[in-house]
Amino acid sequence: MKKTYIVESMFNNMRIDRWIRKKIEPIPQSLIEKSLRNGKIKLNNKIVKSSFKVKSKDIIDIYSFKYKKFIIEKKKILQSNSIIKSNEDLIIDDNEDFVVLNKSSGIPVQGGTKSKKNIVDIFSQSKIFANSKPFLVHRLDKDTSGVFIIGKHRKAAQLLTSLFRLRMVHKTYLAICHGELHKDKGVWDNFLLRYENNKPIYEKAKTLFKVLDKNSNCSLVQMNPVTGRKHQLRKQLHMIGHPIYGDKKYYLNTNKQYKEKKLLLHSYKIKFMINNKKFTYKALLPEYFKKILKIKRLNYSNS
């Protein structure tokens, strides 16, 4: 089955991916690019890239494009209480350059994982990105909740990415970990191991930490990472023998730490500056996090 469209003059010089979202449906960018590569979408009977700009009277053919099924699946995701009630519930701030979200635990920020329920696909359908597409500027683990930023156009995304790379974005995380940390504050400054093509690579990692409350069973820790290594906070707490509750990857075999359903790690606050203007964003703690604080008898004034 094929549907044919003729580009109107009002869409002259518009990118083909934007034309599709504007004229057809707010389809996820990943699906558009895949369809273009596979020849399911053709421009003047030719395969083109998503960045190709259409012209007036161009002919666009769409072959067996199952976007409706895809959108129905995404709507189910948005309506699922186990994921998020709606994308609007996640929004902390929305301006002309970027969107700030309070990401739920369990949602990956991009594709490439076994799950299809990722933030990029969900928000690419939103009216917020009707004339653009979501640009990732940093990462947040699938199971970590809290402040997450998405660029709304390439220029803003490049600037924000640079700020993160140059360590000009100050991040604050909260975690509930096993056991009582003996030092109330300090610095974790060590090397973390990762593998690339089976080759071991050691990367320097630095984090400032402060214990907000503790007892003989657990501790509530505030962490400010200076570097941004993969799984940095989770690895560092595991290395000192105090892994985070709910961490199914970094835990001690002597404890049943993986029994918690959710990882109790939350990106609480982000601060940065653009053109001498200060930006500070906080993400409220999830209800399950506050529930564990109460169960573990840990006090946190801003919870």
Image: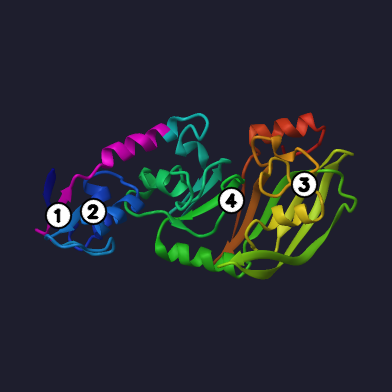
Measured Cα–Cα span from mark 1 to mark 3: 57 Å
Q: Do the residues labelled 1 and 3 touch (CB within 8 Å)?
A: no
Give the image location of residue 101, x and y in percent.
53, 46
The residue tagged 1 is 60
Instruction: State which tag comes first along the sequence, 1 or 4.
Output: 1
Q: Quadrant of residue 191?
A: bottom right
In the picture, the disc for residue 19 is 2
Instruction: State which tag comes first along the sequence, 2 or 3.
Output: 2
Q: Which of 115 and 56 is in front in this view?
A: 115
Measured Cα–Cα span from mark 2 to mark 3: 52 Å
Q: Which amino acid is tagged 3?
A: Leu
Instruction: State which tag comes first along the sequence, 4 or 3.
Output: 4
Position of 95 compared to 34: left or right? right
Q: Which amino acid is tagged 4?
A: Asp
Q: Which of marks 2 and 3 is in front?
A: 3
Q: Do the residues labelled 1 and 2 touch (CB within 8 Å)?
A: yes
Q: Which amino acid is tagged 2?
A: Trp
Instruction: State which tag comes first along the sequence, 1 or 3.
Output: 1
Secondary structure of the residue carrying numbered label 3? loop
Measured Cα–Cα span from mark 4 to mark 3: 20 Å
Q: In which quarter of the image is residue 179?
A: top right
User: Can you see residue 7?
Assistant: no
